[in-house]
Image (cartoon, helix red, strand yellow):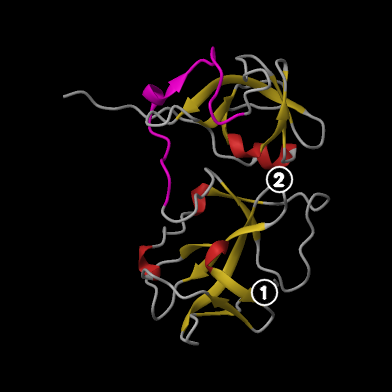
Amino acid sequence: MIFKYGTDVVKDNGEKVGKVKEVVIDPKTDEVSHVILEKGIILSKDKVLPISLVEDANEERVKLYPLDHSLDSLPDYEEEKFVEIRDERQRQPVAGSPPILISYPPVSPYPVGPQIEDEHEMRVVKKEVKNIPHDVQPIQEGAKVITLDGHHIGDVERLILDHQTDNATHLIISEGVLLVEKKVVPVDWINEYDEDELHLAVDRRVIENLPEYQKEEKSGL
């Protein structure tokens, strides 16, 4: 499938619903995972469209499968949750392509999954993480975090868990020689890891461009 900036997005009946604004890729596979729909007559806000809803895409139009829900119910596009790929060595879009993003935190297939809340969702890793293969060592506090281009960007400080499933969702990377701020990285960006090192599917520049991790405080009553 080909995605081109400004291409019309249409329903299965040919009705135009918007235009391609940006595309979101999976950093592990380089495959498109979502398309950002630009707001227009039908959509009041830019929307995040899962690639699973796209039947076909070429230079003239993007055609959707028959929908069982309104596009208005798709997640709104929030720029702070996406990071632009700026490392040209890693990915080089062709002329006319929309900007390439990776989601931060990862955008789940429709509907949207759980979001980061506060430190009540965080625990130092001292047990096996359920959504990581059971035949390897769990991620340990203090493990080195290595980027795709071979830089030791920082160390694992904490792991963020979904309190409902107890599954890991994000890592907090501590400050270090290359990082002046703590960063939160989705576990989906992990390529492989062992007890002492964790290797990411993205380059150092991507991590440096992430927003600083800031703990959310809850006011007491």
- Residue positioned 49% across, 27% down in the render: 160
Query: Circle 2 sits on which residue?
Result: 28
Query: Is 120 part of what is drawn in magenta?
Result: yes
Taking 80 as reference, is 190 above or below it? above
Q: Amino acid at mark 2?
A: Lys
Residue 197, image x and y in percent? 73, 21
The residues tagged by marks 2 and 1 sit, at their Cα atoms, a distance apart of 22 Å
Taking 218 as reference, is 42 above or below it? below
Residue 125, image x and y in percent? 54, 16
Taking 219 as reference, is 204 above or below it? below
Q: Amino acid at mark 1?
A: Lys
Query: Circle 1 sits on which residue?
Result: 4
Q: Residue furthest bottom?
A: 14
Can you say which quadrant of the picture contains the N terminus? bottom right
Query: Is 88 part of what is drawn in magenta?
Result: no
Residue 89, image x and y in percent? 83, 50
Q: Is residue 182 visible?
A: no
Q: Residue 187's image quarter?
A: top right
Q: Secondary structure at mark 2?
A: loop
Per the picture, the main secondary structure of the magenta-coloured stretch is loop
Q: Residue furthest top?
A: 126
Disc 2 or disc 1, which is closer to the eye?
2
Q: Secondary structure at mark 1?
A: loop
Residue 133 horizontal side relative to residue 184, left or right: right
- Give the residues in magenta: 112-132
Q: Residues within 10 Å of mark 2 (few under 14, many from 20)?
A: few
- Residue positioned 72% across, 41% down in the render: 202
The front one of 1 and 106 is: 1
